[in-house]
Amino acid sequence: MNWLLTAAALLAIALPAPAARAQSKPAAACDVFEIEANNDGKGIDPGLGGLARVLKKPPFASWSSFVLIARHRAKVATAETAEIALKVGGRLDLTVRDVVRKQGKKPRLRMAVAWVNAKGKKATASSEVDSGDPWLIGGEPMPGKPKSTYFLGIACTVR
């Protein structure tokens, strides 16, 4: 009987409590940018920060102005989804599927999105990006502005 109690005690010590296991999921800090692109010649909105380097390169360089419509922040734990209401209507469901860590490299996030626009049209995409690197999706006409294009910029960081 003593060996059974000893084994049970060792097992209890070796296995973390459910709350501790849940906390071990790395949470990504994500910024979602709603962007209007057009050719008004006004440049890149300073609120777009780190996205500027990507917006200056093709295919985005075909527009001369990028305006920040809204910025959303969300904490997303691995294998969980954050639902973000978009200012122009619709929503973005952002999922961090996994975080891959390799010695000497930035953590790499495997992400998926489901974007439902204001008209109910749904688009899905997935990508792998380094922690902190931007991911741009979209390219549909801006609601109410036929000469503008609507994009979403996503940047997530994990430690």
Image (spheres, grey):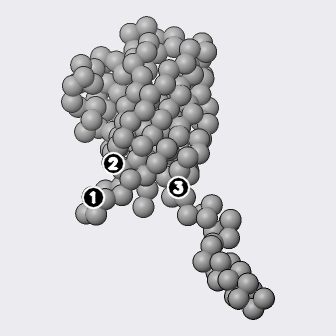
Quarter residue 129 falls in: top left
Task: Please give the name of the residue rendered at 43% of the width and 15% of the height, measured from the top-left corner.
Answer: 140
Q: Which tag, 2 or 3, sits closer to the chain's start?
A: 3
Kind of residue sitting beneath label 3: Ala
Residue underneath mark 1 = 105
Contact flag, marks 2 and 1 (Cβ < 8 Å): yes
> Could you give the CA–CA distance between mark 2 and mark 1, rounded to whole angstroms?
9 Å
Residue at the far bottom: name it: 2
Query: Residue tagged by mark 2?
Result: 130
Q: Residue 138, position in %: x, y? A: 42, 22
Q: Residue at x 48, y 35 (%)?
A: 112
Look at label 1 and name its amino acid. Lys
Quadrant location of the N terminus in the rendered image: bottom right
Left or right relative to 9: residue 30: left
Cβ atoms under marks 3 and 1 closer than 8 Å: no
Q: Quadrant of residue 117?
A: top right
User: What residue is pinned by disc 3?
Assistant: 27
Q: CA distance from mark 2 to mark 3?
A: 15 Å
10 Å crowding of disc 1: few (<14), some (14-19), many (20+): few
How crowded is the residue under tag 2: few (<14 C-alpha within 10 Å), some, or many (20+)? many
Task: Quadrant for the C terminus, please.
Answer: bottom left
- Let me know if residue 4 appears in the view: yes
